Image (cartoon, coloured by chain):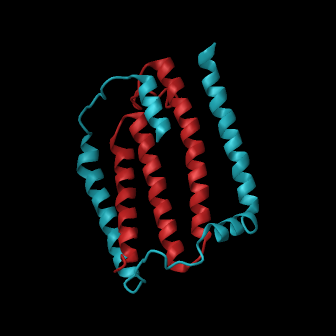
Chain colours: A cyan, B red
Amino acid sequence: MVLFVFVIMLLNAGAEIRHGRSLLAQVLGIPLLFTFLGLMLYFVQHMFPGAAEVRFGAFKHGTALDVGRALFTQYLLPFEVVSVLILIAILGAVVLAQKEME
Amino acid sequence: MTGVPLSWYLILSAVLFTLGVAGFLLRRNVITVFMSIELMLNAVNLTFIAFSYQLKQVNGHIFSFFVMVVAAAEAAVGLAIILTVFKNRATLNIDDVSSMKN
């Protein structure tokens, strides 16, 4: 989020240009979005009627110890793959930003 | 102290996700579209954590870690691309950046 604010500040693009939405968006898109939301709410309400209430501190085995243990045993390979992914992302961002220096 | 039903978390997540979809489809500003993607990812994170609580497993926590890492990588690369596009074309409107469409 800080990155977003930084980019908005850096671009200094002025006010957003607003123009009217297309007819397709008004006629079809917005009602479809509300239908989507309503369907999701309906299914959520009807799939978990007897779900336990969420209480603070009721989940005893969700501490940092358990998360770390699962992360470094069962999910070790995804962890390493994700570390390589974020390294590639950093390299890509540096390469993209480098062009502005020249 | 009374707890909060699990479905409320899922409903909040559904509302956030729908807001993200609406912003993604209806807005024409690149940065707004990007923030909508982040909003959708965070809605999915909230669902992961809620189900992790419900099932009393830490797998959801770990998946939300991975989602956060992917979101961070995506934000870094995407914002670098936005900076480069703004430098070359001086626009933030996604309709003006369509040279690959033809």
Question: For this view, does B34 lie left or right of residue A18?
Answer: right
Q: Residue at x 69, y 34 (%)?
A: A91
When asked about the image quadrant of residue A42, the answer is bottom left
Residue B100 versus residue B44 in the image, above or below = above
Q: Tell me how many marks there are.
A: 0
- On the rendered image, what quadrant is the C terminus of chain A found in? top right
> x%, y% of residue A93?
62, 32
Residue A88 place in picture, x, y as percent:
70, 40
Q: Position of residue A16 (x, y in %)?
A: 31, 29
At 58% from the left and 73% from the top, the residue drawn is: A62
The residue positioned farthest toward the bottom in the image shown = A50
Residue A39, quarter of picture? bottom left
**Image height check: is B65 above or below A39?**
above
Q: Nearer the viewer, residue A81 or A68?
A: A68
Residue at 48% in and 60% down: B44
Rendered position, A26 above or below A9:
below
Q: Position of residue B70 (x, y in %)?
A: 60, 49
